[in-house]
Amino acid sequence: MSTKDQLSSLKGGFLEQRSNKELIEGILFSLPYLATFSLFLLYPLLKGGYMSLFEWNPFFPSESEFIGVQNYARMMSDGAFWNSLGNTLYFVVLTVPMIVIFSLGLALGVNRDIKGRGVLRAVFFSPYILTVSVAALIWIELYATGYGPINSYLSLTGINPPAWLQSYTWAMPAIAFMTMWWISGFSFVILLSARQSVPEYLYEAAKLDGAGSWRAFRDITLPQMRHAIFFVVIINLVWSFQIFGQPYIMTHGGPGKETETLVMYLYNVAFNQRNFGYAAALGYVLTGILVVVSFANYYLFRGNNE
Amino acid sequence: MEISYWTLLTGGDGEIMVKLIKRFNDEQPLGDVTISRQRVPWDEYYNRLFTAMTSNEAPNLAICHGAYLRRFSDLVVPIGDLMSNTNYVKQILDACTIDDEIRAVPMDSHPVGLYYNEDILKEAGVTNTPFDDFSQFEEACNKIRDETDYTPFGPSPNTGVEHRQYLTSIASLGGKLVETGGDGPKAVFDQGPGLEAAEYYASVSGERKWDIPDTSEDRVNREFLAGNIGFMVHGTWTVNRLRDVDFNWNMMKPYVTPNATQLRTAADSHTLILPDPKMSDERIKTTVKVAEWLTQNNPEWGAEAGHLPAYIPTLESDDLRNAEIWDVTLKDFMEMAQNGQLAYYPQLENFDIYDQTNWTWLLDAYAHNVSPKEAVSNGVQTWNSNL
């Protein structure tokens, strides 16, 4: 049976409505992405799953020993894994709400008719274009205990400032705050765009009905922007669970192991201990967590929608 | 033939390496052989080398710290039989020998020493430099603390030098970081000399009041360069930054550990390895010759970059002995190398010893986040889970 016959025999309205030419064009247009996806995502994903079942020998892969699910079982009793997972969750809890609220505040503020609006947009977005190394180095200087500007200003107010990046209490919040400064620009742009898409007549109608600012925000702005907010929450959740560069550069996982996150631990297991099988298993668990969290968010927001 | 060569050197020694390679390519001492240099940032270097080696993309020649040789020894080409001579400082060459096979051509040793600001010492009334024991160092620090507004001593926390200071102290107390037994390597610094060294390290920023318990990155280095600290433990490479300071400085052997039973200083070596075992025999032979040239024709590696050359004729050359830096730093380092006083890091297969994540417990002790005993206990736990 030829391709044409196969296609023409397919049931369902979707394919039947399109000519073979369109279908072939569609496939051809998709090929570059599919090739890239297969090479850089699908293959590593499958290879990682395969490696996670082995005591992997990186120099001589053929000498790797199959150990089944032992790498996954090992996590249950691995204190460093649970510590890094706990640190990651703490970072997520600190960061995601901060970023969403901060970005939403900036977006709503800049959406108003104020002078210098264009400049402010550029300013708020600009940290996002920095690499993690540059952003981290800037904040290492800002947080420096003795000579950092933050502590200098706090000292002027009579506050005895903490050693931000050396303190068991403050190291993670300090990293979370730096992260908010660094990546909020992305969420800000998304939310600003969403806010600008909300029809103004809704606000005018609400105003005529006597609704105040808070009521308009609660009943018009938030519902109208919920898809953008959902996207911002999800993308920040994914990024936050994958945090690596900030603690790696700013604290090296310290003080103690207070800022060692899951990806940082994964990296250490792979490149410090050279245990690539276990690192691959850790990667799969992280992926599983992200999938679960993403679906949970999806259903949560869908529920609100309904 | 073009030899691909990876380095990780930046700053002063990076510039000297560039000059050295340019000289090689200009003079072409091995005939039609040139070097193609690629510099990889320090913090990415070993992972990129590792991934290159596991994916058959390794360069012909690469710099490798002696401490990392065992991590790469499975694939590094043994070269003992191909070297034209082994006239290198024995302790340094020994560090290149893994399982009785020479795996690298040693280029240098870069130990740490005790750098000091002569102007601060003068103001404090300290005139008996260089010191012969810890009590003189202790007295000088106390004088700086009591007689001046300067900070007496910083063992360079959070610069990557803190663990060199710690290793210096452990080795001076006769201890080790790791014991290698039948069950494999095991961290043992949570007791005896390891604990004593950590207690001393914490006391510098504690009861001795020689420094503050602040482990902000690079603080001591900056403060020393700004002329605010009397003594600093640092490596040979720091001379490149000290050339520009506006105070008088000098260096002496690091008698910085109380109750020391011997003088030791933490050291490592830049070595040259052949990380690609799939090279042809001809290319391997040529690459070894290139490595030998780079390590044997480099007086500027000592005179300008500040490292202690490993090749004995270079070490004894007039070029080096007449260099300005010889009397300031290299003479002391050479004496220590000849006396077997260099304390090398343990060579571990599954442990990245320079990764700062393995040393956060030491910064905890210095910052007084936890007691020294708890810090070393945390450190040993981390190390042993990795080892």
Image (tube, rainbow, N blue to C red):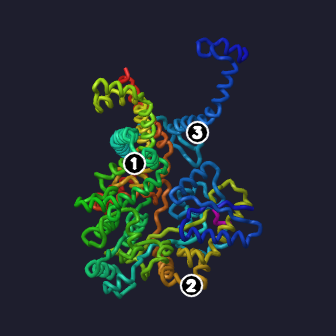
> In the depicted view, which residue is nearer to us: A203 or A67?
A203
Q: Secondary structure at mark 2?
A: helix
Q: What residue sits right under mark 2 in the picture?
A: B321
Question: Bounds of the magenta span?
Answer: B78-82
Q: The N terminus of chain B is located in which quarter? A: bottom right
Residue drawn at x 66%, y 69% is: B21
Q: Secondary structure at mark 1?
A: helix
Residue drawn at x 67%, y 70% is: B22
Q: What residue sits right under mark 1 in the picture?
A: A181
Q: Is residue B321 magenta?
A: no
Residue A232 image point, x, y percent: 42, 36
Which quarter of the picture shows residue B186?
bottom left
Query: Rounded to the nearest whole Å, what is the CA distance between mark 3 and mark 2?
Result: 55 Å
Tag 1–tag 3 contact (CB < 8 Å): no
* Disc with the residue nearer the chain's start (1 vs 3): 3
> In the depicted view, which residue is nearer to us: B381 or B247?
B247
Q: Which chain letter matches label 3? A: A
A199 horizontally vs B51: left or right = left
| Viewer-nearest of discs 1 and 2 | 1
Tag 3–tag 2 contact (CB < 8 Å): no
Residue drawn at x 44%, y 53% is: A135
Q: Secondary structure at mark 3?
A: helix
- Could you confirm whether marks 1 and 2 are on the same chain? no
Q: Is residue A300 above or below residue B230?
A: above
> Is residue B134 in sight in this rendering?
yes
Q: What residue sits right under mark 3 in the picture?
A: A40
Please name the amino acid that badge 2 sits on: Arg
Q: Which chain letter matches label 2? A: B
Please name the amino acid that badge 1 sits on: Trp
Query: Rounded to the nearest whole Å, what is the CA distance between mark 1 and mark 2?
Result: 54 Å
